[in-house]
């Protein structure tokens, strides 16, 4: 596979980490979901969500990060609002990853991978075996094609010889056709 520039790889890796963090936050919020309304002041979610990559998720460069899920007055937000916020953050991070992955620059575009190879790997087979079988198939087809070319070249020479014997006035034309199609002049 073609190498991707390190800076873009690191950016994409950070975006994937942010997406995974958003998924983790949604999972935590769903597991602690309560049906409290917006007017309720009690909620089991009053502690900050910790990043699964270490420490609180308070990356100042990440607009999707959530460092504290409590409101300023110390009253906890209802789970429904927190889940809505986390789902919105997840949607933004997924859109960012999609946008980054779907708009590569021409010098960073990945090569085309044959669907047969992807299916081969999906079936749990070794891609090296696919490559070996592909090379053997190409070699076999090349040998077959070379045999056909040799047979047609031989037929061309035999036909030219027979035409020269049968119609001596076409000797020059037959020789010209033989040379033009890769044969040797007689």
Image (spheres, grey):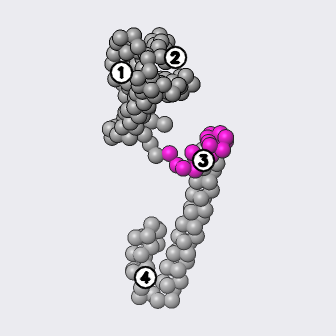
Q: Which mark is residue 119?
A: 3
Q: Nearer the viewer, residue 26 or 34?
A: 34
Please name which of the two marks, 2 or 4, marks the residue nearer to the observer.
2
Q: Is residue 118 visible?
A: yes
Query: Could you tell which of marks 2 and 1 lies nearer the N-terminus?
Result: 2
Q: Which image quadrant for residue 12?
A: top left
Crowding around mark 4 (Cα neighbors within 10 Å: few <14, some 14 to 19, many 20+) is: some
Disc 1 and disc 4: Cα gap in Å?
Answer: 82 Å
CB under 8 Å between callouts 1 and 3? Answer: no
Q: Which mark is residue 62?
A: 1
Disc 2 and disc 4: Cα gap in Å?
Answer: 101 Å
Query: Could you tell which of marks 1 and 4 lies nearer the N-terminus?
Result: 1
Please name which of the two marks, 2 or 3, marks the residue nearer to the observer.
2
Disc 4 and disc 3: Cα gap in Å?
Answer: 57 Å
Q: Is residue 122 rendered magenta in the image? A: yes
Q: Is residue 13 visible?
A: no
Q: Which image quadrant for residue 37?
A: top left
Crowding around mark 3 (Cα neighbors within 10 Å: few <14, some 14 to 19, many 20+) is: few
Disc 1 and disc 3: Cα gap in Å?
Answer: 36 Å
Q: Nearer the viewer, residue 58 or 96?
A: 58
The x, y position of residue 5, in whole percent, is 38, 28
Q: Which mark is residue 44?
A: 2
Q: Which mark is residue 171?
A: 4
């Amino acid at each position: 596979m073609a190498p991707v520039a390190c800076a873009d790889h690191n950016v994409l890796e950070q975006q994937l980490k942010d997406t995974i963090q958003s998924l983790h936050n949604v999972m935590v919020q769903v597991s602690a979901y309560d049906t409290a309304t917006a007017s309720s002041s009690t909620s089991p979610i009053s502690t900050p969500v910790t990043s699964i990559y270490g420490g609180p998720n308070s990356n100042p460069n990440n607009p999707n990060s959530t460092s504290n899920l409590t409101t300023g007055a110390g009253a906890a937000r209802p789970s429904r609002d927190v889940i809505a916020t986390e789902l919105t953050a997840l949607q933004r991070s997924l859109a960012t990853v999609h946008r980054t992955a779907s708009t590569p620059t021409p010098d960073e575009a990945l090569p085309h991978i044959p669907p047969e190879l992807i299916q081969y790997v999906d079936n749990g087979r070794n891609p090296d075996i696919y490559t070996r079988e592909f090379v053997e198939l190409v070699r076999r087809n090349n040998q077959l094609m070379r045999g056909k070319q040799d047979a047609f070249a031989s037929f061309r020479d035999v036909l030219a010889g027979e035409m020269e014997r049968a119609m001596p006035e076409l000797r020059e034309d037959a020789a010209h056709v033989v040379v033009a199609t890769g044969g040797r002049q007689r």
